[in-house]
Amino acid sequence: MKRTVPGKSTLGTVDAVTDGQQSSRALSFGKVAENYDRARPGYPAELYADIAVGDGLRVLEAGAGTGKATVALAELGASVVAVEPDSAMAELVRRRTENLDVEVQVSRFEDCAAPAAAFDLVVAAQSWHWVNHEQGAAVAARALVPGGALRLWWNMPGDLEGPAWEAVRAAYDATEPEAAHLLVCSLGAQPESNVPRAEGFGPWTTSTYKWVQRYSAGEFCAMAATYSSHLALDDGRRGEVLGAVHAAIARHSYVDYRYVTQMVTARLD
């Protein structure tokens, strides 16, 4: 039976956390930066083709993380200023991009030193929900050239159905149900209205990309351990939860994760 989570906004938001908790969670990834880089998926090539990345494209990136999108954009010829608030994550981006046209700033995106009208594109890959939307949109509007675009994208769980996924959800239900949201609940593409309108920009348009990645029990648990909902748990509790999830997947050998990558785009008015 497919399980969805009704009534919860999933694009551009972090549900059920206070501003203080959100800030704390946003800076929780640095302690697992290397694991995050190894375990988290990237984004489909079709997305970058639609962006039309090429030589000379000037990109400002909000929340670079470990550089999954940063590297892909720079390798396709873009010049990137990557803004990342966590120093450990930023250092990993520097190492991964030392031979590419990338500048790394350790800063909240809302406070970054971005020159005015200097970029063709502002992007956020799996990160805009950590940015204050109003302040972030203002930074993007100042930084973009006339007609420039703000592009935000996320990997979302698509249809996660079948005995293996039922076993995984049962493991979370028996241990830490709240940790499962955005990870093992079928969500798919979300309404554009889930992302607040960016002041100074036109309406959002959406592009979606469907793809599948197979995970062993160990690979899935390594990825799950990098989610803020899991990092917020103490070591013992996280080990208990992931032990149950690992056992559930191992009984079925693997899970096929059906991703829906959703990109929303708005043009500067």
Image (cartoon, grey):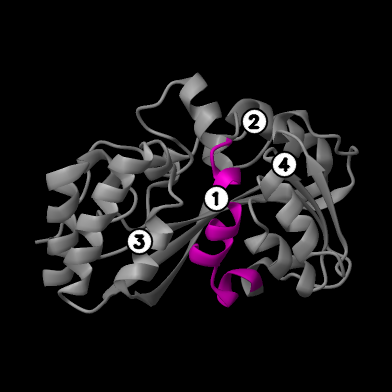
Which numbered marker is on residue 32? 1
Q: Specify whether 49 is left or right of 76.
A: left
Is disc 2 in contact with disc 3, using a CB cutoff of under 8 Å? no
> Gap in Å between the C-alphas at discs 2 and 3?
39 Å
Q: In x, y percent, where is residue 40?
A: 50, 62
Task: Kindly identify the amino acid type of the residue bearing the numbered disc 2.
Answer: Glu
> Gap in Å between the C-alphas at discs 1 and 3?
13 Å
Task: Kindly identify the amino acid type of the residue bearing the numbered disc 4.
Answer: Ser
Is disc 1 in contact with disc 3, using a CB cutoff of under 8 Å? no
* Earlier sequence position, callout 4 versus callout 3: 4
Q: Residues within 10 Å of mark 3 (few under 14, many from 20)?
A: many
Q: In x, y percent, where is residue 10?
A: 38, 43
* Earlier sequence position, callout 2 versus callout 3: 2
> Gap in Å between the C-alphas at discs 2 and 4?
29 Å
Which numbered marker is on residue 199? 2
> Gap in Å between the C-alphas at discs 2 and 1?
34 Å
Q: Say whether residue 186 is visible.
A: no
Residue 38 in magenta stretch: yes
Q: How crowded is mark 4: few (under 14 residues within 10 Å), some or many (20 or more)?
A: some
Q: Residue at label 4?
A: 87
**In the rendered image, which quarter contains the C terminus?**
top right
Q: Say whether residue 48 is visible.
A: yes
The stretch of residues the image draws in magenta is 27-48
**Dot 1: what SS?**
helix
Residue at the image point whose x is 35% and y is 65% from the top: 220
Residue 94 in magenta stretch: no
Between 263 and 72, the residue placed more toward the observer is 72
* Earlier sequence position, callout 2 versus callout 4: 4
Q: Residue at label 3?
A: 221
* Earlier sequence position, callout 1 versus callout 3: 1
Q: Which of marks 2 and 4 is in front?
A: 4
Quadrant for residue 7, please give it.
Answer: top left
